[in-house]
Image (spheres, grey):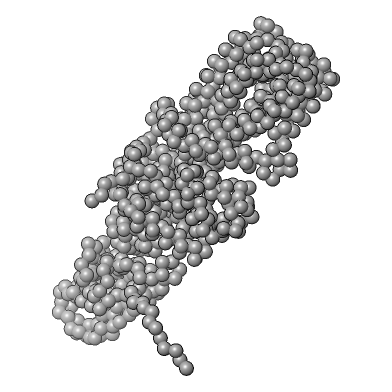
Amino acid sequence: MSEIVIRVENLSKRYRIGERQPYRALRDVLGDALKAPARLISGNGHPSPAQGFLWALEDVNLEVRAGEVVGLIGRNGSGKTTLLKILSRITRPTKGRAEVHGRVGSLLEVGTGFHAELTGRENTFLNGAILGMSKRDITRKFDEIVAFAEIERFIDTPVKHYSSGMYVRLAFSVAAHLEPEILLVDEVLAVGDLAFQKKCLGKMNEVAQRGRTVVFVSHQMNQIRRLCERVVLLDAGRVQMSGPTAEVIAQYEAATLAGGSRGTERAGEIQPKARFLRWAIVEPRAEQPNFVTAPGPVRVKFTVEARERLRMGQIGIALFTSGSDLVWAWVSEKFEMEPGVHDLHVAFPYLPLRPGSYTWDPALWDDQTELDHWACVPPLVIATENYQHHDDKWNGILNLPCQFSVAKGQQRR
Amino acid sequence: MVRVICPPQGWLELNLAELWAYRELLYFFVWRDIKVRYKQTLVGAGWAVLQPLLAMLVFTLFFGMLAKIPSDGLPYPVFYFCALLPWMYFANALTTATNTIVDHQRVITKVFFPRILLPVSSVLAGLLDLAIGFLLLLGMLVAYGIRPTWAIVLLPALVLLAMATALGVGLWLSALNALYRDVRYIVPFLVQVWMFASPVVYPASLVPAEWRWLYGLNPMAGVIEGFRWAITGSGSAPGTDLLASSLAVLVILVSGLFYFQRMESTIADVV
């Protein structure tokens, strides 16, 4: 195990609600100031009862080892950016501490400090310096930066004359040539056209592979899948889960989509003749019974309780995406079932589904009469590797690995 | 290199080693300020000369020739230009330093660097204009046949005093400006009042002797009177005045540093 380079202990950050609103006018605080003048200049007087606080981060603990690429995911407002801001020292925590071993470079935005009046060349130096590069480093990498941005011809033109694409390319290019030991990146790849995004992702991959430590925030799950080995899920300022990428992402997607229902056991309702009790994946084995983490054969078990004997029993199973699109449906042959608890096993050679969350919708029949129908919770979560295009928008429903080769063909006459 | 990140604690966190590590960024900020200031202006760096020159003409005409304010025996243009050089440097440095934190809001919320670099670079960037103006002043001295005294070698010390004053007040105001945007509107007024409280349009000798000690508390009074004296030998050598000024500057600067340092930890949250 490599050494720990980021250690976060009980880190909390409190914002006063309204603090993020643009500044205060003096008149708002002048009244208070007359009562307590010192508060006026300390600028953080006690809030009036109406104001209240917001804990953007609460008791966060985290360890990142050297060379790890860790993804940080969570809904908007879950504290991802706040955590990055604290680690990059833009703001200070309210409680707790963090230890960072090594030079930190942070990329919360590309093009920070770009000045419209300055030329591409001038901005490269300025922006590089702001991001923490030394003048020598920038000079050394200058040609590389310009080439990566593909703006050689315009490098001495003021950036205000750049197209937005050129602007972003240059900005990212400067950032991409940062070489800190620890890189903190916040959702900056969502820039530029598709081809450039691809190039950026390639560059990030390169950075990660050179053994640098990277903490990466993104809402694009495929980017996270491609870049990160480990993912930390934040929710309302707390670490909700931390672990292998596929599992955490799947859990996150399941939670966002299922609205947070828990447990594989079905809640007791009115007692029909027969009903579904629970479901689970029997094969492949995973820590959670609703997760498929490895490609290959999948066997699912639906547990049914029959209170009477079924003579012409039948089970129909439908599988829906989280968006309620039907993926697959099937109906069994008729079977007989004695009263008691039974496991109905359904085996698949392979479930070629793209990573995400799905819902089983089995129905139990006896002699053409529906006895029970259950939209299973928890949802089925496919947490396998994604073999598709790295961009979310080019991801279809199927997730199939494929082999690719180029062979010399024959010329047709 | 291990860095511990913890909640702000206490008043004293000035980290000189870190400031030193960021000296290159300071250089880039100053370079950018200078570069940007005259980009897209017609006359470009000529403004560094034109601004004090035009002010000098106006002052000479109205305060000198119309109001007949005494000038300690100096020709009005020299009398005013000697004062306008340090004064305009100071007024510009103070104004830009005050606004610098708010103007860099975006950068501050996205990247870490010692925030103090911003007001410091405002104060440093103005020095180029001062130097250009000084060359013009030398030309004027030749034209008026005034021999500078040996005391001219003391000018750097006076400039340093003006820088320290602008920085000290700028530290206070830039941090306050981040909290209360009102400051931005107060500063032009403050600068104007301050100018009349300094011997820019009149000689310090006009101030009644019993009030001189109070007058001396205004560091710019010492600087401006010192400028006239060091360059032309007119007026009196600044003595106790300057001592009082220096003490006042020291208080402003040190308190400004502490206040700014204290605000630094939360500035990205409130700006």
Where is residue A341 shown, x and y percent of the image? 16, 73
Where is residue A90 shown, x and y percent of the image? 44, 41
Q: Decide: is B27 above or below A199.
A: above
Q: Residue furthest right?
A: B66
Which residue is at the front of the view, B225 or A137? Answer: A137
Q: Residue at x 38, y 35 (%)?
A: B7
Which residue is at the front of the view, A11 or A238? Answer: A11
Q: Residue at x 55, y 39 (%)?
A: B29
- Give left or right: position of B100 versus A46: right
Q: Residue at x 45, y 54 (%)?
A: A176
Where is residue A14 shown, x and y percent of the image? 41, 40
Quadrant of the rendered image containing residue B61: top right
- Give left or right: position of B134 versus A357: right
Q: Residue at x 56, y 34 (%)?
A: B121
Which residue is at the front of the view, B247 or B192? Answer: B247
Give the mark count.
0
Please indicate, yes or no, whether residue B111 appears anywhere in the rendered image.
no
Where is residue B43 shown, x and y percent of the image? 74, 40
Q: Residue furthest top?
A: B210
Q: Decide: is A358 above or below A21.
A: below
- Give left or right: position of B193 versus A122: right
Quadrant of the rendered image containing residue A388: bottom left
Please indicate, yes or no, whether residue A120 appears anywhere in the rendered image.
yes
